[in-house]
Image: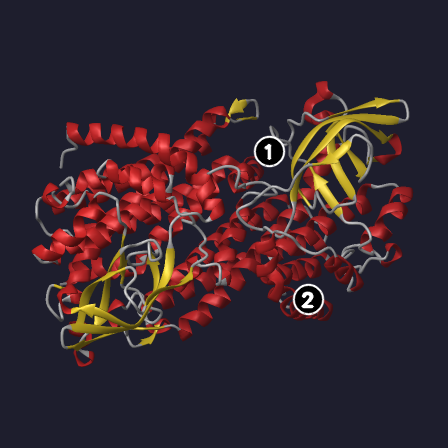
Amino acid sequence: MDFELNEDQRMIKEATRDFAQEKLAPLAQEFDEKEKIPKEIYKELADLGYMGMLLPEKYGGSNLDFISYILAMEEFAKACAALEISISVHNSLVCDAIFHFATEKQKEKYLPRLAKGEWIGAYSLTEPSAGTDAGSLKTTAILKGDHFLVNGTKSFVSNGEIADVFIIFVLTNPEAKSKGISCLIVEKGTEGFSVGAREKKMGLRGSDTTELSFEDCKIPRENLLSEENKGFKLALTLLDPSRIAVGAQSIGIAQAAFDEALEYSKQRVQFGQAICNFQAIQFKLADMATQIEAARLLVYRAAYLKTKNQRCSIEAAMAKVFASEVANMVVNEAVQIHGGYGYMKEYAVERYFRDARVTEIYEGTSEAQRIVISRGLLR
Amino acid sequence: MIIEEKHQSFRNKIRDFAEEHIQPLAKEIDEQQRFPHDSFKKLGQMGIMGMVVPPDYGGTGDDMITYAIAVEELSRVCGSTGITVAAHNSLAVYPLYLFGNEKQKKKYIPPLAKGEKLGAFGLTETGAGSDAGATKTTAELKGDFYLINGNKCFITNASVADTLVITARTDPGKGSKGISNFILEKGMPGLSVGKKENKMGLRGSDTAELVFENVKVPRENLLGNEGEGFKQFLITLDGGRVSIGAMALGIAQGAYEKATEYAKERIQFEKPIGYFQAIQWKLADMATKIEAARHLIYHAAWLKDQNKPYIKESAMAKLYASEVGSWVCHQAIQIFGGYGYLREYPLERYLRDIKLCEIGEGTSEIQRIVIARDILK
């Protein structure tokens, strides 16, 4: 058992922390208020290698191992969770999907431009009536000679507005239900494909979340990713790494909230002394730190398994559900420690509270994680 | 403790009113951070702005349980409206009634009780939050008036109130025994409203700073006697806690009802999600905890109505209702899944709103101190 990060991993963590704290953290409040992240940032991220983190150099990637990727996500989330989810979707759901399942021709077409940040990726599985029950998709893609005719609506698509390349899941064989799902690569601007208005969310307001509509949209047959009717398995495979990434996001937000609360408790004077002198506050801080540490270890352990290409569905689900629930506990206590100030937008903990809430919902709700875990246990 | 027929018929009346007049505004006033003045005029006509005072002063003379039901039912559809009513009644009208002399009561209470005017209570300062006795605002007696200087923060209704009860230090050497309460009127020279707060939730309610720069307050505006301020605001907060508990209860009830409805309608895996045990148990726990909170609140209110001690019970009611309420709102969002996170649906507002109930009028931490002190005394 070795809990040490290697030299490369440590360097990535430190470099990402320095960049994120210096360049992103000061802007996070503004992104939240304006509900927008300027697109130029992605170019800067690409120059630093953050838009193709897991890809080999051959495609312009940074060739990082999965643990390094998770360390970077944690640091991004600590500075700005809205930007983190955008980068995470691009890297672990889009670039990784294409890298693992695409033909060489598809890889050459998409990966270098995604890694350079010229294109941004989005991933779309959820539909209005297919949330936790992701196998019940209604969007159809019927093969008509050299193309698929796509009709339907997808919802809650992160990066929907800014993306150029979309990985979408559709029904190619409606009778076969979840066994008739396939995955297509869709490019922005394709006729019959439109992006809806940004959803107004409780938190992560800097990131854009939209609907996608397909009306007799023709997608060339060569845009099929992997094989026909193998899409559901592919979607599930991709969810493991992205759940670990949401775990990393959760501990990033939790750590940021904890750091603020710790600092505030040392400075805030009530009853003639710093409130950190009171046992009630001390025990809160002790519990928060312990829970964060436990969550971090679960997330790193799942990332380690993934790095070793071992099965990690249960571990990823455990890491995600535990870390996201810890994050919500921690942001809640961080607001309590701040008292009335914690309820005001001037203080970062107010945003952390709103941002953390979604970690228990997306990439599978906590309930969906428990289904995954218990199925694994009862198999 | 018995919920009487009159309480049930009052609940029906206020619920109908809230659903017809308050609910339709809830989303909009949150989005626009708009204070809904008209709502309080209408509530005034119904007697809701003077529930804690007798008809002699323009109030309804209702018991505390009825008042708790009013705050609960308003908060069930709109937390912002709930807190405005709670702060006005419990923190402004009630201390005027309890501690004011006859002349003060006759002058200030009737317009407040009828909802023609709004009231606020200024206690908190930047350096005096949980440690409310650390007030730095001073009131210096100069012949027939007091000269007040200082700042208050996080004051509910600060910029909309016509009548304000504020705490200030009349004797710097005496610690918490050197605090006195004063009645201030909007428009007094030197009294101004500072920064309006941009809050996580309750965005349709008004929260702002108060600034006092050599405000001349007539001596006759002293509430009770000099040095009684600390005791007065502790008594005031005991009642206020019941109302914040009722507010949390109402928000939780609203979120729970919406989640229950959704669990019946939302189909996943070819069945309504309420069919699944994980959702059933959530709803069962939510309903049980809400019911427990409701009884704690009504019990504390009943003790008050019986003129029995209720300090510990009101702190327990507020602590439990606000923490359980936050948990209920959290679970309601879980049941809604992704939709719960969208501002198009009311659930995320309920969570943002209820969070304040764990902070305002004494944080959960302070409630635990109050409860522990009573237990250990």
What is the quadrant of the C terminus of chain A in the image?
top right
Q: Residues within 10 Å of mark 2 (few under 14, many from 20)?
A: many
How far apart marks 2 and 1 lie (CA) works out to 33 Å
Up the image or down, A206 lies above or below A273; here it is above
Total marks drawn?
Answer: 2
Chain bearing mark 1: A
Q: Which residue is mark 1?
A: A131
**Residue A282 seen anywhere in this rendered image of the structure:** yes
Q: Which residue is mark 2?
A: A16
- Residue B170 position, x and y percent, is 18, 75
What is the quadrant of the N terminus of chain A in the image?
bottom right
Query: Is residue A348 left or right of A179 when viewed as pictured?
Result: left
Given the current orientation, which residue lies at the most extreme top position?
A175
The image quadrant that residue B9 belongs to is: top left
Q: Residues within 10 Å of mark 1 (few under 14, many from 20)?
A: many
Up the image or down, B226 lies above or below B56; here it is below
